[in-house]
């Protein structure tokens, strides 16, 4: 459940994630770019940082978290072209071949080897969750062969690793969604002195262009609420993910499993699972895809212990529970991934989301590059 400890900065950066142990703080590298490839079922994709940069392919770690509009999200929620910030680690132990990279490409771009994401978030989430906003300075008319209108801003708040920490010019036009009082307004509502949040995407000649500008907290909060509700609907039908810390098998069948739930979920989901006291548990792959009809091939258990820890490591919720089960499935082993159903509506998933054969489990571990 706890994070692995490391002292040397370089050793922390090159930490190799292991099943059943959360990485130490500072592991991996920061990288950002537009989401240009997305595989929602297997929680994978690629970022493109600039016009000529190599695509940075990645797989989400099992406990990898996604944020959109400041709320928990899933890869499927992120529109193509959205500029994202991420924390990328070396491949999870045993998944070194998940994303194939040639030695030649690694020599050209060594950072491509950091291809397992523990965190991925859009600009509005990345900056607002760290206490950063943008102060509007005004508009400027860009020059050059393709002049574009620019929104001139300066950062307000703390300096952020991997962020823009100096005044900036963002492309803006009539395609930009400008939000005020929870409504779309014209860009002439943007005034000097306002503090705003923005979402960005790639602009011509490697500029940064605005997709959204929020002029008040009320408008961003409305978008955050919509995204939160979308994610609640997703998790209540797909179940809360976690991994097995410990297993105790009874002599006459059944047993107990101790499970740590992953982080990045709305607090209400953990409360519902705790209060329900009889979670159903099913086994899953590192992609979080479950085995066959996850509602049918799961075991109803009884929560006999619930522990909470303060300041959990990144990736962990800090919630650990011990569940008594009448039947033990193959996937109930230390370090393996499971998903837990709380007192939520019965739902059967589309067939392309679950795995029905050992061969499908094997295929799901390998990213097929476009």
Image (spheres, rainbow, N blue to C red):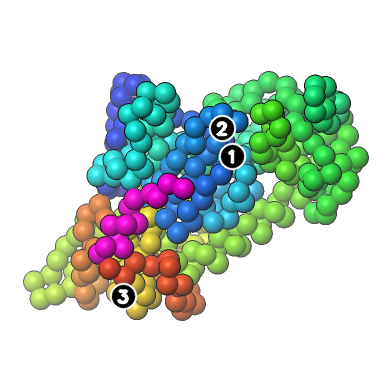
Look at the numbered discs 3 and 1 and tell me whether their residues touch, using CB distance below 8 Å: no
Q: Which of 64/301 is in front?
A: 64
Look at the numbered discs 2 and 1 and tell me whether their residues touch, using CB distance below 8 Å: yes
Q: Does residue 108 show up magenta in the picture? A: no
Q: Left or right: where does residue 258 sit relative to residue 218?
A: left
Q: Is residue 370 visible?
A: yes
List the residue tagged with mark 2: 49
Cα distance, mark 2 to mark 1? 6 Å
Q: Left or right: where does residue 141 sit relative to residue 13?
A: right
List the residue tagged with mark 1: 34
Element type where label 1 sits in the image: strand
**Which comes before the other along the chain, label 2 or label 1?**
1
Indicate the position of residue 266 as horizontal and vertical percent values: 53, 56
Name the residue: 39% across, 41% down: 116
Q: Quadrant of residue 23?
A: top left
Q: Which residues are magenta?
A: 358-370
**Which comes before the other along the chain, label 2 or label 3?**
2
Cα distance, mark 2 to mark 3? 42 Å
Q: Quadrant of residue 133?
A: top right
Dot 3 crowding, Cα within 10 Å, few <14, some 14–19, many 20+: some
**Which comes before the other along the chain, label 3 or label 1?**
1
List the residue tagged with mark 3: 297
Q: Which of 175/199 is in front?
A: 175
In this rendering, the label closer to the viewer, 3 or 1 = 1
Dot 2 crowding, Cα within 10 Å, few <14, some 14–19, many 20+: many
Element type where label 2 sits in the image: loop
Indicate the position of residue 141 as horizontal and vertical percent values: 86, 26
């Amino acid at each position: 459940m706890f994070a692995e400890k490391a002292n040397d900065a370089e050793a922390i950066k090159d930490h190799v994630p292991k099943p059943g142990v959360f990485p130490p703080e500072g592991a991996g590298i920061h990288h950002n770019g537009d989401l240009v490839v997305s595989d929602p079922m297997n929680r994978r994709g690629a970022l493109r940082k600039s016009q000529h940069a190599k695509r940075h392919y990645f797989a989400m770690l099992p406990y990898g978290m996604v944020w959109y509009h400041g709320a928990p999200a899933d890869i499927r929620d992120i529109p193509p072209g959205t500029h994202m910030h991420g924390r990328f680690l070396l491949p999870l132990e045993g998944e070194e071949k998940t994303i194939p990279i040639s030695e030649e490409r690694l020599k050209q771009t060594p950072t491509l080897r950091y291809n397992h994401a523990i965190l991925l978030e859009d600009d509005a989430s990345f900056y607002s969750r760290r206490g950063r906003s943008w102060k509007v300075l005004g508009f400027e008319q860009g020059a050059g062969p393709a002049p574009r209108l620019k929104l001139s801003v300066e950062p307000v708040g703390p300096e952020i690793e991997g962020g823009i920490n100096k005044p900036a010019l963002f492309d803006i036009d009539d395609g930009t969604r400008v939000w005020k009082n929870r409504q779309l307004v014209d860009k002439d509502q943007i005034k000097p002195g306002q503090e705003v949040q923005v979402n960005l995407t790639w602009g011509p000649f490697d500029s940064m262009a605005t997709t959204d500008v929020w002029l008040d907290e009320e408008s961003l909060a409305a978008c955050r609420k919509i995204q939160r509700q979308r994610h609640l609907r997703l998790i209540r039908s797909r179940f809360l993910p976690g991994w097995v810390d410990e297993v105790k098998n009874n002599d006459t069948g059944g047993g107990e499993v101790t499970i740590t739930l992953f982080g990045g979920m709305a607090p209400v989901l953990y409360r519902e699972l705790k209060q329900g006291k009889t979670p159903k548990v099913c086994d899953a792959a590192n992609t979080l895809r479950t085995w066959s009809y996850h509602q049918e091939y799961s075991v109803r258990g009884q929560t006999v212990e619930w522990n909470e820890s303060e300041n959990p490591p990144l990736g962990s919720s800090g919630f650990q529970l011990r569940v008594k089960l009448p039947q033990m499935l193959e996937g109930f082993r230390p370090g393996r991934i499971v998903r837990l159903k709380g007192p939520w509506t019965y739902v059967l998933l589309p067939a392309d989301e679950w795995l029905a054969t050992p061969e499908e489990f094997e295929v799901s571990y390998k990213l097929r590059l476009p």
